[in-house]
Amino acid sequence: MLSSRLGNDTQEGTETFTPYAGGAPANVAVACARLGVPSRFLGMLGADHFGDFLARELAAHGVDISGVVRTNDARTALAFVSRDADGERTFDFYRPPAADLLYRIEHLPAGVFEAPAILHLCSNSLTEEAIADTTLSLARMAQRADCLVSVDANLRHNLWTEGSADTALVTRLLDHARLVKLSRDELDYLRGDHPADVWLSGRLAAGVRLIVITDGADVVEARGVNLLLSVTPPKVKAVDTTAGGDAFIGGLLAMLAEDGIDGEWYRNEPRLRRALDIACRCGAHAVTRPGAYAALPTRADIAHLKA
């Protein structure tokens, strides 16, 4: 559950909040669905009002929620998001305890990886040992089934007990992926004292096929073995950057899925450039709208956007 600040009410200085459905992997599932690509959300929600709201919103946007599990053992997580004049966010999370942290491998629907698919994950499900084990197990299962594992670092340091993300654990998850998305700031945090090129080469050596590095409104860079692409996003006025990254990776995955994920997808430069262009348009559109699901574009929304 994601609540986004709209502004002040009639009493000067008092913040008001409006509920928006959100959550990084769920945002990506909605992004794909709104672009016409079938998507499914796997996870756990509380048996509460906010869980009802999230499930209803996912389904309303065309996401398959047959793999969603409900529990009375914890509440649905909340995030309060405050925006500044440039649309940049400050997050306050109410988690743990939360229902999403209770999801386990035994909750997976039967046969979930029998057909070729893309599994998308992020580091927010690494913040406690049990959910981290589930996340890494999911990645390994998808790999063994020849699915494409996608990971967005999506670092939210205040979700971690120590107040900062565990770089070794996040990197371990990245190395289970074939597609990795990082912001420039996340790259700088995760690489530590290592030069960027050395750290990125380490991920490629571990088996990552494509690393996409975003930098806000600036140029997007994509790296692979013997591959370097750059794409410039459209210029827009940002209102709320909450869903920008998720809209980007959702657009990228949707285009890759639409073309079919074969063994050489990461070598097809024209196809990758087209997918990155669409992804940039999706991200650009999303930051011009408040909220998460509500900001994610359809194909008609991005048709007119150009770099």
Image (cartoon, rainbow, N blue to C red):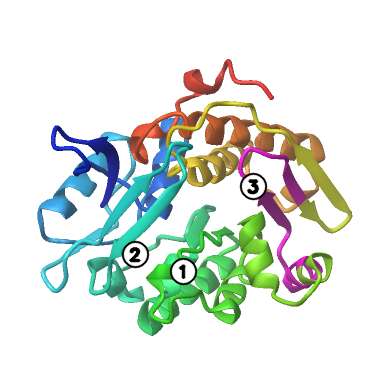
Q: Which label's residue is closer to the chain start, 3 or 1?
A: 1
Q: Nearer the viewer, residue 141 or 156?
A: 156
Whether residue 215 appears in magenta in the rendering, the answer is yes
Rendered image: mark on residue 261: 3
Q: Disc 1 residue type?
A: His
Query: Which residue is situated farthest in the front direction here?
Result: 12
Q: Quadrant of the C terminus?
A: top right
Question: To which residue does mark 1 refer?
Answer: 157
Classify mark 2: helix, strand or loop.
Answer: loop
Q: Position of residue 73 (x, y in %)?
A: 14, 74
Identify the magenta region: 200-222
Classify mark 3: helix, strand or loop.
Answer: loop
Classify mark 1: helix, strand or loop.
Answer: helix
Q: Does 16 appear above or below 204? A: above
Query: At x 31% / y 63%, what residue is drawn?
Result: 93
Q: CA distance from mark 3 to mark 1?
A: 33 Å
Dot 1 surroundings within 10 Å: few (below 14), some, or many (20 or more)? some
